[in-house]
Image: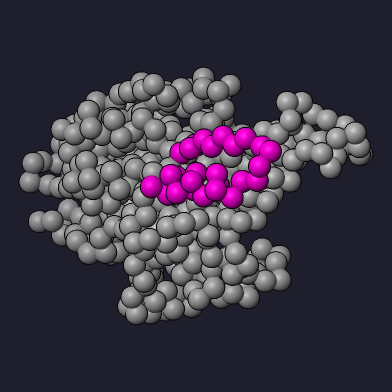
Amino acid sequence: METLLNFIDENKERYIKELVELLSIPSISTEPENAKDVQYCAEWLSKHCTSIGLENVTIHQTPGHPIVYAEWLNAGADKPTVLFYGHYDVQPVDPLNLWTNPPFEPTLRDGKVFARGATDDKGQVFLHLKCLESWLKTKGTLPVNVKVLIEGEEEIGSVNLEQFLEDNKEMLKCDCVVISDTAMYKKGQPSIVYGLRGLCYMEVHVTGPNRDLHSGSFGGAVQNPLNALAAIISKLKDEHGRILIDGFYDNIPDLTPDERAGFAALDFNEEEYKKALDVDALFGEQGYTTIERLGARPTLDVNGFIGGFTGNGAKTVLPSKASAKISMRLVPNQDTNDIAAKFEAYVRKVAPAGVTIEIENLHGANPVLVPRDGVAVQAASKALERAFGKAPVFTREGGSIPITLLFSTILNAPSVLMGFGLNSENLHSPDEHFDLDNFHTGIKASALFYEELSQLSA
Ligand code: BES
Ligand code: MN
Ligand code: MN
């Protein structure tokens, strides 16, 4: 392992340079005008996979963005097969004016690389490719069989990946899945994530009068769609952070004393958390600690409010239409389609007269808990401890990775969430970045993961 780890050290600068190239591709999956860039990114990755010695590299077109697949299956039938999963698509960049450097002109500063997609998820995908390259260049072999699956639609709900898994069960057959698309607990403290929340993302469209109206001539006579929408939103949650949608909390089990002890052991520092966000108070569902609320309780938030006059100065006008984008994070035993139906019924129930309501389901994902035992988790645990010098903690994350549940239901393989990001790295927001120490140590940790897995499975 000495030569392999030295090789990773010696190639640190080159690996960063190549990552910068990957980060300069604007592969934004939500924007139709970036479809060509997403396609180009898939091609870039597939060429890269070939150049580092992976085999059967293919780009699978879908009704949406392409999926990149590659493999190296020469370790032998007695060795386990690992499927690595990640995504090369990234979030939109707005608000652009809040970026210190343009989002697709990656910049190295303070030991970090700043660019859209740096931590979510290109940097974490690339470190796995560099780990495979390091193995193949120094040893000419891998200690396990590896399949690589990198999709371009994670940020839009992995809409075509489920079908791809169904259609390619044999090709994707594996003993475990490793995903690096989550955060470490904090810098220097690696973690294995065992729970992800689900998501139900809705858009509510409210229409009032058939056109915008003079607010003097008509104000007081008709329902204003923006006011109506604000009224609806105010009824979604009470002042204690409890969601008021009928049946929303059905079937959610109470946290067990064990789980609560697990959260408490993480010594979450509320003061530091507030300071890092410049807020004087935290807010969430009463009766739970902040870290319990983040990992193990559902929530509801307005993500965007659209409507009315937002230009300079005052224009006296009543809007004809208003919309809001509203997301709900879900926890085990909630189902995204069931919650969507309950949301719609409740919004229609509380909507005032004088407006019409349309409700769109933008996308969803079911929550997931992954096993905390088994050889793959053990291997990840040992590898993280060897690479970072500290045993990992087990955490639950508030974000969602829609496909995780389907790896267990369709491929019947357990997933290990071994992430190298930090929640402070501005994912989905301006000045996204990735810590270059974590990039470098992440390459070593994944290299050790494959070695540990090979030994534990023997
Ligand atoms: N990598 C994130 C999910 C994540 C973030 C997990 C932080 C753990 C910690 C992923 O790319 C993501 O953003 N998922 C979306 C899913 C959605 C668009 C269907 C999310 O959680 O909003
Ligand atoms: Mn991600
Ligand atoms: Mn994301």
- Report whether residue 362 is seen: yes
Q: Residue at x 71, y 71 (%)?
A: 280
Q: Nearer the viewer, residue 410 or 116?
A: 410
Picture coordinates of residue 132, whole percent (x, y): 31, 42
Indicate the quadrant containing the C terminus: top left, top right, bottom left or bottom right: bottom left
Q: Is residue 145 above or below residue 269?
A: above
Picture coordinates of residue 73, whole percent (x, y): 17, 36
Q: Nearer the viewer, residue 191 or 371?
A: 371
Part of the protein shown in magenta: 338-363
Q: Residue at x 34, y 43 (%)?
A: 403
Quadrant in the picture for residue 172:
top left
Q: Is residue 62 above or below residue 303?
A: above
Q: Nearer the viewer, residue 262 or 209?
A: 209
Quadrant in the picture for residue 270:
bottom right
Picture coordinates of residue 212, whole percent (x, y): 79, 29
Q: Is residue 7 above or below residue 264?
A: above
Quadrant in the picture for residue 218:
top right
In this rendering, position of residue 405 left or right of residue 223 = left
Q: Residue at x 63, y 50 (%)?
A: 232
- Report whether residue 94 is seen: no
Is 237 included in the stretch rendered in magenta?
A: no
In this rendering, position of residue 274 left or right of residue 183 = right
Is 345 included in the stretch rendered in magenta?
A: yes
Q: Residue furthest left?
A: 78
In this rendering, position of residue 330 left or right of residue 350 = left
Q: How many marks?
A: 0
In this rendering, position of residue 217 left or right of residue 448 = right
